[in-house]
Image (cartoon, helix red, strand yellow):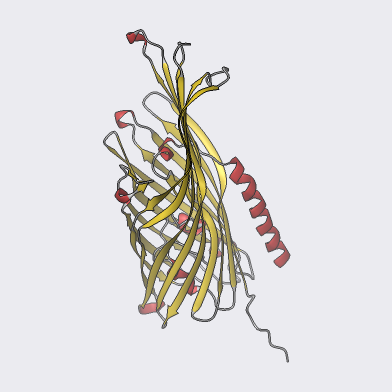
Amino acid sequence: MKKFKLFIIATIVAFGNIAYAQSGLNSPYSRFGLGDLHGENVNAQLQSMGGISIGMSDATLVNPGNPASYAAFDTTAITFEAGIVANYLNLRTNQFSESTNGATLSYIMFGFPINKWWKTSFGIMPFSTVNYNIEINVDMSEYNFSNIVNDLVGEGGINRINWGNAFKIGNNFRVGIDASYLFGTGSRSSKIFFLDSLNIYGTNVQSKVNVSSFIFDYGLQYDLHLKNKNILTLGAIYANKFNANAKRNYLASTITGGYYDVVEENIDTIDYRPDEKGTLTIPTRLGFGAVYKRPGSFLVGADVEWQQWSDYSAFGLADTLQNTLRLAVGGQYIPKHTSISSLLKRMTYRMGARYEQSYLKVNGNQIDEFGISFGVSFPMKKSKTALDLGFEVGRRGTLKNNLIQENFFNVNFGISIQENWFYKRKYN
């Protein structure tokens, strides 16, 4: 069994390396701010329940959505989790429709005990993604002038490596902290071409921002034991504002060509700023959650989370980002979890929904997002290993004021493996 599990781990990691290279949804809204934010509730189980995470804790679940949850790890076991997400995206305006798809490794996480009251976790996951390719055509014929094309291209993003520690205080109270190292590069370019004129140079503006810095998140959880062995868990998370270290390379130049089959050629440099040091402000974040559960049977929960993105700035310049709000509800049900039950009764069934006000306001319209999710877990007999499969369908944006509406369908696949590596065997 251990060899089989190690094979699964190696397969996921190997596929993930390939998926990173193949991923990339063309999302125009990732042009703004830090791009598309991924949050910390990336686990396939949590995604199937609308992304609830602040009040979630389980011995077999690595949940960076609230670092206090690590204190629930089994004192004799190590937990490994990995996940892959496949995305399908349809972009719509009042004039056109276009589809794109991709897949990527969404997380790799470990959790294990230091002792009975101190547990720790390591993980890697995306923080934000930039990926767009937009062509804007401006018809200038009524002014007897050359048509203008503006090509906007962006790629890359920021990843995070988490090291979390959680401490159990008494029987019901847990506190935790995540130290996250942010790293990665986001590239953006804007080219302007005058297609019908050989006498006007185009322009090319390129910017690459590399991030390398630490941020910290804090969490609390408290269990209230109710009748019939039911438990109500209350949770809270907080992250203070951080100025993440960054380095930017900026180049603006005049060009000829670069469109269709015409070779691009640099004519002159307008502005060049290599290795410019600065900071990106990651703003304050606050959230609360609650989960009501009967262990081994069912749970229902809800989250509310807020972040002050109006404080965001990059290299000393403020942006026009809005404060974000995330609301999530979800739950799960296990019909009958015993070793002799049928697979259908041992499976875990999940559903959830979420609503998010993003940090974007374009042409006076708040860019909102909502999704409905569901999923299942397939447990393996005589082990604490499970395969998780989740689906989410949703929408972001609007067709108002000539904006873009994104309709998405996500498939999350995860595996959770728990092994009793810290168990002391007894011999007669």
Which residue occupies the extreme left position in the image? Answer: 364
Q: Is residue 81 left or right of residue 254?
A: right
Q: Is residue 201 left or right of residue 301?
A: right
Q: Quadrant of residue 420?
A: bottom right
Question: Of residues 241 and 254, which is closer to you in this image?
Answer: 254
Q: Residue at x 65, y 49 (%)?
A: 15
Q: Is residue 384 left or right of residue 284?
A: right
Q: Position of residue 294 (x, y in %)?
A: 42, 72
On-image quarter of the N terminus: bottom right
Q: Position of residue 59 (x, y in %)?
A: 51, 71
On-image quarter of the C terminus: bottom right
Give the number of callouts: 0
Q: Position of residue 184 (x, y in %)?
A: 52, 48
233 is higher (above) or lower (below) than 161: below
Residue 296 visible to the viewer: no
9 is higher (above) or lower (below) than 315: below
Which residue occupies the extreme bottom position in the image? Answer: 428
Question: Of residues 260 and 361, which is closer to you in this image?
Answer: 260
Residue 79 visible to the viewer: yes
39 is higher (above) or lower (below) than 150: below
Question: Of residues 201 and 29, which is closer to you in this image?
Answer: 201
Q: Residue at x 34, y 45 (%)?
A: 359
Q: Residue at x 29, y 29 (%)?
A: 401
Question: Of residues 64 and 310, which is closer to you in this image?
Answer: 310
Q: Position of residue 332 (x, y in %)?
A: 45, 61
